[in-house]
Amino acid sequence: MNRWEGLDEFVAVAECGQFTAAAERLGVSSSHISRQIVRLEERLQTRLLYRSTRRVALTEAGQTFLQHCQRLQDAREEALRAVGELTSEPKGLLRMTCAVAYGERFIVPLVTDFMARHPQLRVDIELSNRTLDLVQEGLDLAIRLGRLQDSRLVATRLAPRRMYLCAAPAYLEHYGRPHSLSELGRHNCLIGSSDTWSFQQNGRESSQRVQGNWRCNSGQAVLDAALRGLGLCQLPDYYVQEHLRNGALVSLLENHQPPNTAVWALYPQQRHLSPKVRQLVDHLKAGLAERPEYRCAS
């Protein structure tokens, strides 16, 4: 005998309060509903319903059983939706956000490529260096860099992110190379969005405030200034790796390099992702892995 048999009929009767209304909901006869309930009670060896000529009421056992049956129905529908959406075509509006520079360079080209493959999808991208609230702003997805703060969100790691302290050879020839964190105070530090830089010391992450005569909240601008020999910079790998390989920049204090962080896709908590978000996240992860900036990263 099918162990699910009678459960849907029982829930319909319990929620409708009548055999006739339950039959109309399920599109079957009242006699079918009655037979299924009787068989269910016999199988459970307990009464689930008090019957009268006009209405039915739940017994104590029926009330307990109803709660479990409703959860089973929800889980069954969730499973059917999840499997059905594995091959569903992304469509409708997807709203997302990302930091400006990283978005322009890495994320937007991949999203554009994704849209070309899925013409039923519409995307609204807000590039902003502010940390937007996904729930309040009605956003489906956010791409964030570094360490995560908002525990209300679900995170998927898209790519590694490693910070480098470096400088141009011309600057080091003129001002010397720092050999310890305490020597940073004697150097001109090119400050980006924060004057607090992260390092690792004695096996633990530490922060150090730096100072200098140049500041701009653009990673590309900081990189340009460093390449011109204006001072030390601390930037993520995707800005500096090429210049470290060709010798235009030199990596410094590698023993104090901070622990790796990551590039993250974040989305509001829910039981499963919609096809458009899930497939875009997979596309972004695969696309970033193919970028030369990440091929040698770990």
Image (tube, grey):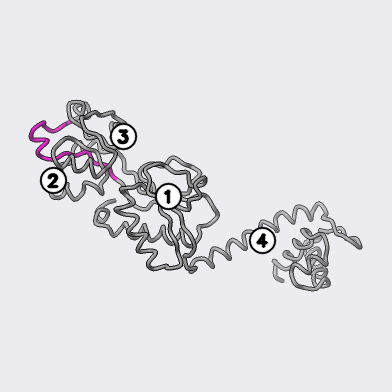
Residue marked by disc 4: 73
* The label number, if any, that marks residue 194 in the structure image: 3
Query: Which quadrant of the figure contains the N terminus?
Result: bottom right
Q: Determine the CA span between mark 4 and mark 3.
A: 51 Å
> Residue 184: horizontal and vertical position, in percent?
20, 29
Give the mark nearer the N terminus: 3 vs 1.
1
The crowding category of the residue bearing disc 3, from other C-alpha atoms within 10 Å (few below 14, some 14 to 19, many at least 20), is few
Q: CA distance from mark 2 to mark 3?
A: 24 Å
Badge 4 or badge 1: first in the primary sequence: 4
Measured as percent of width and height from the top left, residue 61 is found at: 79, 54
Cα gap from disc 1 to disc 2, whole angstroms: 33 Å
- The amino acid type of the residue labelled 3 equals Ser
Q: Are marks 3 and 1 in contact (CB under 8 Å)?
A: no
* Position in image of residue 207 (x %, y %): 31, 31
User: What element does badge 3 sit on?
Assistant: loop
Contact between labelled residues 3 and 2, with CB atoms less than 8 Å apart: no
Q: Quadrant of residue 29?
A: bottom right
Q: Secondary structure at mark 1?
A: strand
Say which amino acid is labelled 4. Answer: Gln
Task: From the viewer's side, name the closer residue of 217 and 74.
Answer: 217
Q: Is residue 243 magenta?
A: no
Residue labelled with disc 1: 142
**Residue at x-position 11% and y-position 32%:** 176
Against 181, residue 75 (above or below) is below
Q: Nearer the viewer, mark 4 or mark 2?
A: 2
In the foreground, 273 or 44: 273
The local crowd at label 4, few if under 14, some if 14 to 19, many if 20 or more residues have their Cα within 10 Å, is some
Residue 178: x percent and y percent?
A: 16, 31
Label 1 is placed on what type of residue?
Ala
Instruction: Tell me the SS state at disc 2.
Output: loop
What residue range appears in magenta?
162-179
